[in-house]
Image (spheres, rainbow, N blue to C red):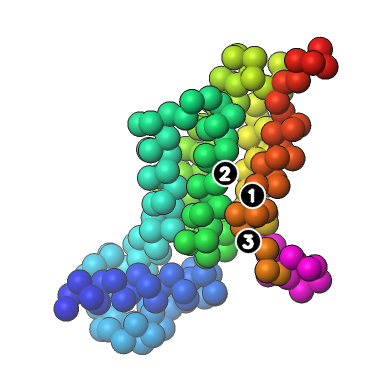
């Protein structure tokens, strides 16, 4: 029963925080919507901020698991690593539809949890991509003049913007039925064509 209340609070908080933002959601509203005693928020999470941090951790945990798998079983090449990363990020966005909302919210109105959770995971992503681009250049797989920082930011933007703007795009494009998987395939093709070293052109 206690476990059910804890899970219910996380699920309720995820929806409310995603819709309204951290500051606009009260402990009373969280408890009322979850149909639990408000004292349980302090009991399980130490307060509203602790609950919010748990929600953020739950949103990012799939990214942490993905990076761990890539570290334990490295892809065969830097290009394969980029492809695997992008396909996994696309799948994570489908499984965590509120992830982009939380990222945007923390970028525009950062809470104390931004440093503890959001920046921590973004730093891990940046480190993985940056290292992958460095290896790709060193192995002659990517263009020798590739800027690792720009490439990292570019790929991160490509893999997130579609899911951030998808609700808007659906209103004035013919792509409403197209999936994140289809987008990722085309975006990857475009991105890789820009960074791969073409020996026949040297």
Does residue 195 appear anywhere in the picture?
yes
Magenta stretch in the rendered image: 163-175
Query: How far from the left and from the top, in percent, is residue 200?
Result: 79, 16
Q: Which residue in the structure is indicated by mark 1?
A: 184
Against 87, residue 193 (above or below) is above
Residue, x 29% and y 71% (percent of image)? Answer: 7
Label 2: few (<14), some (14–19) or many (≥20) C-alpha neighbours in 10 Å? many
Q: Quadrant of the N terminus?
A: bottom left
Q: Say whether marks 2 and 3 touch (CB < 8 Å).
A: no
Residue, x 80% and y 68% (percent of image)? Answer: 173
Distance from disc 2 to disc 1, alpha carbons, whole Å, reads 7 Å
Q: Say which of 130 and 41 sits in front.
A: 130
Query: How far from the left and from the top, in percent, is residue 144?
Result: 71, 16
Q: Say whether marks 1 and 3 touch (CB < 8 Å).
A: no
User: In the rendered structure, which disc, 2 or 1, sits on the residue that comes first in sequence?
Assistant: 2
Q: Which residue in the structure is indicated by mark 3?
A: 179
Does residue 28 appear anywhere in the picture?
no
Distance from disc 2 to disc 3, alpha carbons, whole Å, reads 14 Å
Q: Quadrant of the C terminus?
A: top right
- Considering every residue shown, the one lying at the far front of the view is 200
Q: Nearer the viewer, mark 2 or mark 3?
A: 3
User: In the rendered structure, which disc, 1 or 3, sits on the residue that comes first in sequence?
Assistant: 3
Q: Which residue in the structure is indicated by mark 2?
A: 86
Residue 58, numbered label: none
Instruction: Check if residue 54 falls in the magenta segment.
Output: no
């Amino acid at each position: 029963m206690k476990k059910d209340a804890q899970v219910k609070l996380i699920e309720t908080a995820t929806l409310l925080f995603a819709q309204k933002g951290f500051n606009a959601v009260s402990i009373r509203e969280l408890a009322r919507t979850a149909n639990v005693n408000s004292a349980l928020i302090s009991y399980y999470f130490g307060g509203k901020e602790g609950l919010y941090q748990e929600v953020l951790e739950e949103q990012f945990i799939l990214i942490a698991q993905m990076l761990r798998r890539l570290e334990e079983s490295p892809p065969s090449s830097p290009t394969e690593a980029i492809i695997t990363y992008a396909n996994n990020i696309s799948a994570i966005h489908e499984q965590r539809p509120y992830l982009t909302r939380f990222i945007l919210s923390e970028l525009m109105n950062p809470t104390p949890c931004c440093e503890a959770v959001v920046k921590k995971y973004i730093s891990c992503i940046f480190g993985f991509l940056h290292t992958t681009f460095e290896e790709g250049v060193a192995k002659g797989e990517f263009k020798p003049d590739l800027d690792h920082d720009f490439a990292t930011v570019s790929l991160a933007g490509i893999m997130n913007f579609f899911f951030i703007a998808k609700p808007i795009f659906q209103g004035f494009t013919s792509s409403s039925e197209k999936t994140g998987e289809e987008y990722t395939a085309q975006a990857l093709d475009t991105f890789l064509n820009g960074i791969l070293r073409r020996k026949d052109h040297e």
